[in-house]
Amino acid sequence: MAKEGTGGKGSLPTHPDAVQDANGRWFNPDNTPLSVSASDLERYTYCPMSWYLATKGVSGQSEAIEKGKEQHQAIHESMMDLKEHQFEAKRNLLIWQWWYAIIVVLLIDTVAMQYIDDMGLNVMEFSKLLAAGALSFLVVGILALLVPWRKAIGLKQPFLPALEDGVETIDPVFEPRGFMGGWFQGGILEAFMFVSAILLAIHSSALLFAENRQQASYVLAITTLSWTFLASIILRRALKNNDEARRIATENDLKVTDEISYSDDEESAQLLVDKDTGLRGRPDQIVIIDSEFIPVEQKTGKVPKRPHDSHRLQALAYARLVEVTTGRTPPYALLRYGSDHLHQLPWDDAAKEELDQQILVVQTAMAQGGAGRNHDRPGKCQHCSRRHACDERLV
């Protein structure tokens, strides 16, 4: 039975001045849609009275909530560790690739220095040719660095999704979003020009001043071996970081190739907003899986036999937010319970319709009131973190 109080009357409206449009949506007097967070949807679906108490500033009280916060923070830190190890693995592998290219060049130089006199080449003329090439690369690199030639020829960058207000989820290390070069700003091409100029200049000088070819080839051979040893250290670092990234990814039901685009730390994570419906929220993570942005909602505590409707709608809300903020439709959202239960929720037309209807239900309660306990299950009330302030709780 319900406790004496407001039971059966329902809540008062939280936005009595809201107006409804022809499509049934509710708007503030300034013509902005009533804001509904993904957490609002979760609370309202669990019990409208719990949602209403939350709007009045009643905080949930239970050991599970505090433990859940700690677990969510641990998950966030794990995601950041994964991202860091992935970054370090890629960076070291990139360095190793460049160093391996240098090893190949040094190896060719060693052989060439040993046998160049037997090839019948005019060493002096060949040295001048290399010097001319070095100068050409240098001049072109300087011009490319000073002149915004990318803008002049209308060069466009590949698609890079962005969040609300232009806050990007991903940016390349080289040539970040909006980069057009020029005015002492260079990119990959400019770097290639200058590196090429340096290498050609070094080879030109070596051919010109290395009188003892045998001694020069010996020095180059030792240099090649030393560079190979250093490159092996870089490769080992890359493999070590990749192994650690793989371990963390496996613990979180991810692949080592999946990238963490976003992770909520409850402080600095960007708020995602759908300006058309008023929906907003911060997913626990956004992961790039097979080139798709997939929202992930992490749930701690007891693992249910099947996903709760409240949790499912919250995860679908994040699918909508990812869709509107990146311009790309995720095929599904992920709902994870604990470490071993991962549910894939299709983001299809039926899911979109269900989400829209629930947003409208919450907005209607905000505008007209009437939210109250919608069940007769004592066990559900017992597990509600706001039962201490609820006049409609079952006892």
Image (cartoon, rainbow, N blue to C red):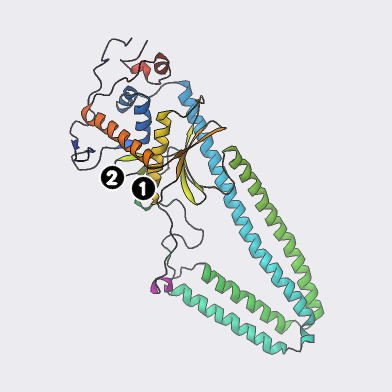
Front one among 232 and 348: 348
Label for residue 276? 2
Q: Is residue 259 visible?
A: yes
The x, y position of residue 287, in whole percent, is 49, 45
Q: Amino acid at mark 1?
A: Val
Marks 2 and 1, how far apart in space? Answer: 9 Å
Q: Quadrant of residue 11?
A: top left
The x, y position of residue 246, in whole percent, is 62, 44
Q: Is residue 281 visible?
A: no
Q: Is residue 99 magenta?
A: no
Indicate which disc, 2 or 1, sits on the residue closer to the N terminus. 2
Q: How many marks?
A: 2
Q: Quadrant of the C terminus?
A: top left
Vertical order, 191 against 330 (above or below):
below
Q: Is residue 319 left or right of residue 101?
A: left
Q: Which residues are magenta?
A: 148-155
Front one among 9 and 126: 9
Say if mark 2 contacts mark 1, CB within 8 Å.
yes
Q: Residue at x 67, y 85 (%)?
A: 127
